[in-house]
Image (spheres, helix red, strand yellow):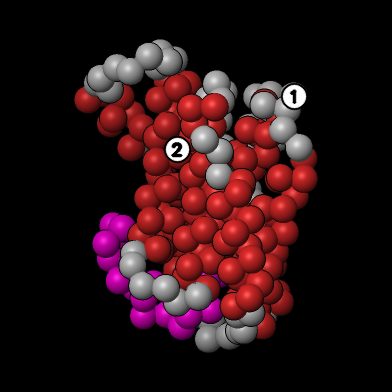
Amino acid sequence: MNSHNLIEELYKLPLYHRIAFAATCCERLLPNYAAFCLAERLNEDNTASLFNILDLIWVFAEQEYVDTVQAQQAIDVCNYLLPETEDFDTVYTTLALNAVAAILHTLYVCLQEPNNHLNNIIELIFDTYDEYLQIVGAPNLQPHQVEHSMVEWIAQSPLFVTERQKQASDLAFLQSNSTLSRDIINYLRQSSKQIGIHPIKRGLLK
C-alpha cells in the first residue's frame, strides 16, 4: 500500500483511531529526541515532558475525549522544545526536530485542525530514516548530492521496509477494531516501541 492509499484509508477511520495511529508514529520517533538531549547534555526534563505529552495523547485516544485546554498547553510546550538546528552540532538535531514536529501534528489531529497532519507525520518518519541512513551510509557532513544508488539502498533498507509494513499492519488492526480498549492501546504502543532507530538502546551514544 502506498502512502496516498494509506492516508485515504486512515481518513475513513474515526477520529480517535486516527489519533492512535499518529501516536504510534510518535512512539517510534521520540527516542531520537532523547538521544539528542543526551548528546547535547540538555535537561532530561525536556524528554520527560514530550513523553508525558505522548501519554496524554494516548489517553485522548482511549477515552475518546480531547481536553482542548490540555492539548493547547501541550502545543505550547512542544513549540518551546523545538530545537533550533543552527544552535546544535549533533547529527540527532534534525531527528529531534522531526520528533517534536510529529507530536505537534498529532496534537493538531486531536484538535481536528484542517490540513494534512497525518500525511505530515508519515513524511516526518521517512524523512527521519532517510536523514539517519544518509549519515551512516555516507558520513559526509558537508552538503553533497545523494547518488541514485544511495536513494535505492535507503528505499530498500530494513528501516523503510519495516516501517511500511508496520503502518499497513496498524491500519488493518485499527480497521478491524471498532473501539479502542486498554489492551488495544497497549498493543499499539508496545509494538511501535520495537521499531525505529533507538540510538540510546542500540548503544550509539552514552
Q: Residue furthest left?
A: 148
Using the image, tell me which numbered label, if any, was put on residue 171: none
**What residue is at 53 percent from the left and 86 percent from the top?**
178
Amino acid type indicated by mark 2 = Tyr
Q: Between 148 and 55, which is closer to the camera in this rendering?
A: 55
Marks 2 and 1 close (CB-CB < 8 Å): no
Counting from the top left corner in percent of width and height, residue 133 is at 44, 28
Q: Can residue 6 be seen in this snapshot?
A: no
Q: Is residue 99 above or below residue 182?
A: above
Name the residue that disc number 2 marks: 129
Percent x, y for residue 41?
73, 27
As drawn, 39 above or below 99? above
Q: Nearer the viewer, residue 51 or 113?
A: 113
Looking at the figure, which quarter contains the C terminus?
A: top right
Magenta-drawn stretch, dominant element (helix, strand or loop): helix
Q: Label 1: how many residues lie within 10 Å, few (<14), some (14-19) or many (20+)?
A: few
Q: Nearer the viewer, residue 73 or 152?
A: 73
Residue located at (60% from left, 70% from top): 71
Q: Earlier in the sequence, mark 2 or mark 1?
A: 2
Look at the image and say whether residue 11 sits in the magenta stretch: yes
Question: What amino acid is labelled 1 in the image?
Answer: Lys
Q: Tell me where residue 160 appears, x and y as whole percent.
A: 41, 42
Q: Is residue 150 placed above or below 26 in the rendered structure?
A: above
Label 1 SS: loop
Q: Which residue is at 56% across, 25% downward?
A: 88
Name the quadrant containing residue 73.
bottom right
Q: Is residue 45 magenta?
A: no
In 3D space, how far apart are the residues under numbered discs 2 and 1 (Cα atoms)?
21 Å
Q: Which residues are magenta?
A: 1-21
> Is disc 2 placed on a helix, strand or loop?
helix
Instruction: Kindly identify which residue carries mark 1.
Output: 206
